[in-house]
Image (cartoon, rainbow, N blue to C red):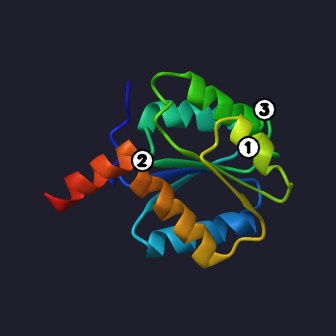
């Protein structure tokens, strides 16, 4: 069963650092998105199934299910495989993120223009994002 979210422009983020969460939330809210945070990969997987976000942003080093395993599981599940994943980490793991099915990898620290550009690029290039833009224009 899918939750009805008041704003269909939801980005789901699995991030441990409160300071990074605060910045991500600020930047994305200013760009018109609603942000939902989870503390671990298991919660991210459950919420992605429930709310079908436009995008999942995950760091690698999250508890229960790490960010790479989360990306793999999202890609393997027919209900979530169309949700793009952005891996955002301090680790130099771009190739591993790609192998895990992530659409994009960004290395920390958080740079507003780079982060927002990546988010907007993934949403615009993705069928869910294109559909969301169509709905928004009606």
Query: Which residue shows up at 64% across the image and 36% down it?
Result: 101
* Numbered mark located on residue 126 in the image: 2
Left/right placement of residue 107 relative to residue 85 reads right
Residue 37 in view:
yes
* Horizontal and vertical percent position of residue 29: 47, 70
Taking depth in this image into account, of 103 and 65 the one nearest to the observer is: 103
Q: Which mark is residue 89?
A: none
Q: Check disc 2: other Cα within 10 Å, few if <14, some if 14-19, many if 20+.
A: some
Numbered disc 1: secondary structure = helix
Residue shown at 58%/31% (left/top)?
A: 74
**Circle 3: element type:** loop
Say which residue label 1 marks. 97
Quarter of the C terminus within the rendering: bottom left
Rendering coords of residue 117 (x, y %): 53, 69
Chain-order first, disc 3 or disc 1: 3
> How much space separates mark 1 and mark 2, taking CA atoms?
18 Å
- The crowd level at tag 3 (other Cα within 10 Å; few <14, some 14-19, many 20+) is few
Relative horizontal placement of residue 74, taking residue 97 as reference (left or right): left
């Amino acid at each position: 069963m899918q939750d009805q979210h008041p704003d269909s422009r939801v980005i789901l983020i699995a991030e441990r650092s409160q300071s990074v969460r605060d910045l991500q939330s600020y930047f994305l809210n200013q760009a018109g998105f609603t942000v939902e945070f989870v503390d671990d990969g298991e919660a991210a997987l459950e919420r992605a199934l429930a709310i079908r976000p436009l995008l999942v942003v995950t760091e690698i080093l999250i508890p229960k299910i790490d960010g790479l395993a989360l990306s793999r599981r999202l890609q393997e599940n027919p209900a979530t495989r169309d949700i793009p994943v952005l891996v955002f980490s301090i680790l130099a793991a771009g190739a591993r993120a790609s192998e895990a099915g992530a659409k994009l990898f960004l290395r920390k620290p958080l740079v507003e223009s780079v982060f927002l550009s990546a988010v907007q690029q993934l949403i615009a290039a993705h069928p869910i994002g294109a559909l969301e833009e169509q709905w928004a224009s009606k």
